[in-house]
Amino acid sequence: MRDTEHVKEIGSVVSGRGSSARDAVVAQSWLRCVEEYGLDPARPSPAHIVTEARLREHREQSEKLIAIARSGLEALFRQIAGHKYVLLLADAQGVTVDYFGDPQFEDELRQAGLYLGSDWSEDLAGTCGVGSCIVTKRAVTIHQSDHFDLTHTPLSCTAAPIFDMVGNLAAVLDISLLRSPQPKISQSLALNLVQASVRRVEMANLMAMSRGEWVLRFSTMPEFLDVDPEAAIALDGSGRILGMTHGAQTVLARQNGPLGGPVIGERLDRFFDMSIDSLPDLMRGRPTEDRLITLRDGQALFGHAIAPQTERVARAPASAGLPPALHNFAGPDPALRCLLDDAARLAPTKIALLITGETGTGKERLARAIHTCQPANRPFVTVNCAALGPDNLDAVVLGAMGGAEGAAGGTLFLDNLADLSPAAQGLMLRLLAEGEGRPGRGRLRLISSCAEDLSQAVREGRFRADLFFRLAAVTLSLPPLRLRQDFDWLLDRLLRQSTHARPQSFRLSPAARAALKARAWPGNVRELANTLDVALALSVSGVIDLPDLPLAPLDPVAQAEDLADVLGACNGNMSLAARRLGVNRSTILRRARREGLIGG
């Protein structure tokens, strides 16, 4: 049975007899766990680790922040690793999207929930560092018996919120200990560390997102102004505030009086005794102690202005407002951006969509991204049409439709639609028609995928026209990887994803990057991801070079023709051998090294 004295102590804090505001945060959380979530403090529950598919969705939506934060988090982990701390970065929903921990304790950390993919939302995990931080939007330490769930009482968790440029909660940074025998005050250093790291992450995020705008960084002490400022704001050419760190929001909100008021969209001179024209005088050409700025209430600060680093360009309003799941789907590729603009407009509707594209282009990922654009906790149910036949179609499809409808209405994803046999097509049409008459059926969203031109199959009589028109009100066609203009962006993104759980950073050599860009990629994005995974496994350093790249599975040089014989016939000339085999010279070089035909 849970310690009743502790429960009574929690109750006394709620009623106003507690000793501190921080104790009150814990007490209020306990009340929510019991009264709102129906959790039982006497019954331990295992850690909640989300599925790989859900983790991938959460990581994709947080991808930019993860990339921006990672170098700072690596530096922080080096500071705390010797003290057996674990570092977690959770998104605004409480799911751990990045993780740093000692590999030798991996099993124990996973069991405790201090692991990639763990869900620390308060309604699942009870009172905890991440969950309480999300609710209160303030830094907090949840120490040992402060935790609601018995599974977590050995832990000590210190968390701080990370806000985006417009003041919304974006993530939570958490430092945790598996076992902490010391009193709660022992975690004061952890609290200071996590708050300082959060400030730097927010600063790095604002700088990365505001390269085309003026940035004003400020601090109360000139010594730290250029190296570790306390706050910053981003400004457009007219002096209106476009973004800010949370530290800046705290400072500027005070200028609006006790009732507060908006900061984003307001002019610089509303808060400071200066205008946009004053910013050039605050650049690095002057000593920091001379760069004095004054708030409207008279408080003196030191300012550092950074001019726009890239020329401002007009942003397409639709692309700029893409939901995160769609925004992270592609890089600077005009054709894909137009497709994603259409997907964003279609996402709130119930229009049946057909996604086409070669194998490995990301059809299911796009379907999930469209699904994720709508409110959370709606089911996404996949049916593989290639595995359906007349004998099992009724049970599988009806079960999937029921699961996808749910209480709030979800998405039914019909994968490999062209693989339905003629008999199965007729049954599918009947089931969909019957399903429309069931209560709640109108809430179901239908998305299908196909690796071929299904309209051509209709014209050739291989696919029923009535089923096609029911499922393909709009067709979204994904381009093959060889035609994408964002290959470098995609390559870097996949490399970050493949190395997120590794303590070591990796990069591609220029030669390896060029060799990858020269391939045909018949397996598209899936093949590229697999190639990087193999290269990381084979690499003996932090640099992936030509010898680390595996052969392309469909490369002619990987077939029966003996490379030694070809090189012999070409007198060892790599370029001539490459032309003879119809591949790149780098492929011949890599193969020759692996087979010991040349040194290195």
Image (cartoon, rainbow, N blue to C red):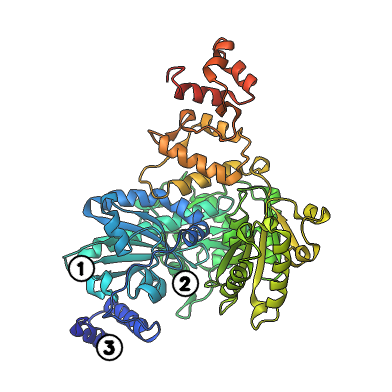
Report the residue that reaches farthest toward the front: 391
Gap in angstroms between the C-alphas marked 1 and 3: 22 Å
Of the numbered discs 2 and 1, the one sitting upstream in the chain is 1
Kind of element beneath mark 3: helix
Report the residue that reaches farthest toward the bottom: 15
Quadrant location of the N terminus in the rendered image: bottom left
Of the numbered discs 2 and 3, the one sitting upstream in the chain is 3
- Residue 92, image x and y in percent? 46, 67
- The residue that mark 2 highlights is 253
Where is residue 427, by image quadrant?
bottom right
Kind of element beneath mark 2: helix
Q: Report the side of 162 relative to 342 (left or right).
A: left
Q: In the rendered view, would you say 457 is above or below 48?
A: above
The amino acid type, in three-letter code, at marker 2 is Ala
Q: Residue at x 52, y 54 (%)?
A: 215
Q: How many marks?
A: 3
Quadrant location of the C terminus in the rendered image: top left
- The residue that mark 3 highlights is 16
Q: In the rendered view, would you say 98 is above or below 559?
A: below
- Residue 258, image x and y in percent? 45, 80
Frontmost residue, 278 versus 12: 12
The amino acid type, in three-letter code, at marker 3 is Gly
- Residue 517, image x and y in percent? 60, 35
- The residue that mark 1 highlights is 185
Kind of element beneath mark 1: helix
Frontmost residue, 445 versus 460: 460
Q: In the rendered view, would you say 330 is above or below 507?
A: below
The reply to whether residue 598 is visible in this rendering is yes
Report the residue that reaches farthest toward the top: 571
Around disc 1, counting alpha carbons within 10 Å, would you say few (fewer than 14), some (14 to 19), or many (20 or more)? few
Q: Report the side of 302 relative to 435 (left or right).
A: left
Frontmost residue, 7 versus 522: 522
